Amino acid sequence: MTATLDEGEWRARQHAHAERIRPWIEPRLERRRRGERHPVDDFLFEYYSFRPGQLATWHPGAGIELTGDVREWESVRGYVVRDGRALVDPAEVPIDSLRAFAHLLRQTTEREPQYGCFGRHEWAMVYRLGQDEVRHSTWPLRVTPAQIAEVVESSPLKCTHFDAFRFYSPAARPLNVVTPTRATQAELEQPGCLHATMDLYKWAFRSYPIVGAELTADCFALARDVRDVDMRVAPYDLTALGLEPLPIETPEGRAEFVRHQRAFAERGARLRDRVLRVIESALAIPQPA
């Protein structure tokens, strides 16, 4: 089923999207002009390689046609203008990628969330390394190497996410109960994982033009909140950035982390379902020969 937005409607949504995105991207652009870096807020732009301008550009996604003066959509990648209407160009739908994304999202949805990792991945990334070897070496550690070792070695590491595990220090990798690889990602991904939740943003923007800008922004908003907690539980001292430590080295800190983890999993489940439904609807549309 296709919905139609007249020009007044889609321009209003264009404007609302730009206003929503502006507070997220303007600080990033200003820091870049000054040559400054922020280990938390810059992560989503650097790691996920979706530029601020791309995030700020509104587009409706599949299943919506735009009417009115749609001439500007003739030059928008992934869209086509036909009979005075702008819509997703079926020839631009990344079918093979969408099938892979749908499979991963379904597998993740069907798996029970796990809450026993306690966010120790950032600790495992600096385990048995010198200060000059860690990822965020310009920021001080708030704990000693001995305390990092104690937390890492306190119980088996339970990371199920390849893109977190691959940054483990060499000494930490054998301590993980599984060895995630890119090939086993769909077999291990589970909805309690902070990184799997952040990755909803990746699957949304990589599904362009199928997944619209507003749903992509919803995924970005969740990823920002997750990243904030992700770095609060890290062994770095980021209080200068306004991030108070969430001390998972204590029972109280671990309990607080799990509360955040459960809340993120619930939010992620709703967004995962929305992204998956959009992708599956697109896959059900007959493709041009």
Image: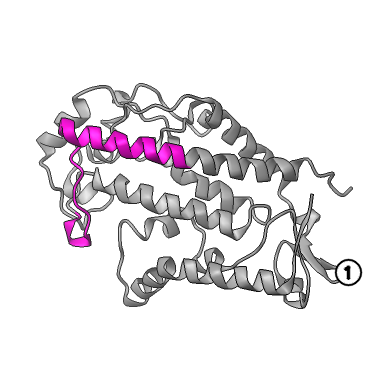
Question: What residue is shown at x 84% (from left), y 44% (from top)?
Answer: 286
The secondary structure type at the circle numbered 1 is: loop
Q: Left or right: 7 with respect to 272?
A: right
Q: Is residue 163 visible?
A: no
Highlighted range, magenta: 238-267
Camera-side residue: 116 or 123?
Answer: 116
* Apparent side of residue 252 relative to residue 211 in the rendered image (left or right): left
Q: Where is residue 55 in the image (x, y as percent from the top left)?
A: 53, 63
Q: Residue 262 sits in which quadrant?
A: top left
Q: Total marks drawn?
A: 1
Q: In this view, does 146 lie to the left or right of 268?
A: left
- In the displayed structure image, the side of residue 147 where residue 13 appears, left or right: right
Disc 1 residue type (three-letter): Asp
User: Relative to the observer, which residue lies in front, 183 or 52?
Assistant: 52
User: Is residue 245 within the magenta segment?
Assistant: yes
Question: What is the chief secondary structure element of the magenta stretch?
Answer: helix
* Quarter residue 72 falls in: bottom right
Q: In which quarter of the image is residue 259?
A: top left
Residue 1 drawn in magenta: no
Q: In this view, does 65 lie above or below 283?
A: below
* Residue 141, horizontal then vertical, whole percent: 15, 48
Instruction: Write the residue at 41% across / 26% down.
Output: 179
Q: Is residue 158 above or below residue 87?
A: above
For label 1, the residue is 83
Examine the rendering and report whether any part of residue 193 can be seen: yes
Q: Where is residue 119 in the image (x, y as percent from the top left)?
A: 29, 36
